[in-house]
Image: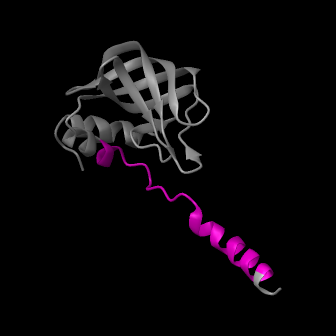
Amino acid sequence: MIRLPLLALLLLTASPALALKCLAPDPARDFRAAEADSATWSGVYGWLEVLSHPEGAGTGQARLTGRSLTAEGFSQPFDRDIALQVSCLGPWCGQVESGPVAALLRHGRAGLVLQVEPCRANLWPDPELAQIQSLSACMAGACD
């Protein structure tokens, strides 16, 4: 009899240990990871309009209008449809909403892909100036 209440108590106290722990957003860390990847990546900064977002893992569509990253900073006009590749880690799935973003996009077979992960690697909604400057510095070869 006492085992059932004890088991319930243990399960309730264990739930915080099951919470998703994400690293703080770090554009320099993500830039270095993309640079080390065999895929080609592009940095962008602008307005993301989410056209479709899957429930859970899957593929959606968006349009991103703004500037792409070059050695001179975010200097190249950018206006393209992109794919959203949403992934999940257990019950936690990546989410993205329409609005200002900075992001690293992977070049895929069918076009540019924004990987939407639960911990938001490669994606900075409503980016701070320091995040924009960090990405620009990395592209110029001065990644901190």
Residue 18 is covered by the magenta coloring: yes
Instruction: Report which quarter residue 135 is drawn in.
Output: top left
Q: Residue at x 38, y 39 (%)?
A: 122
Q: Residue at x 34, y 13 (%)?
A: 77
Q: Is residue 78 above or below residue 138?
A: above
Give percent across and percent down for residue 31: 28, 41
Give percent across and percent down for residue 123: 43, 37
Q: Nearer the viewer, residue 37 or 76?
A: 37
Q: Nearer the viewer, residue 67 or 1?
A: 1
Q: Residue furthest bottom?
A: 2
Q: 36 left or right of 19?
A: left
Q: Residue at x 72, y 78 (%)?
A: 7
**Bounds of the magenta segment:** 4-30
Q: Residue at x 50, y 59 (%)?
A: 21
Q: 29 left or right of 52?
A: left
Residue 104 is covered by the magenta coloring: no
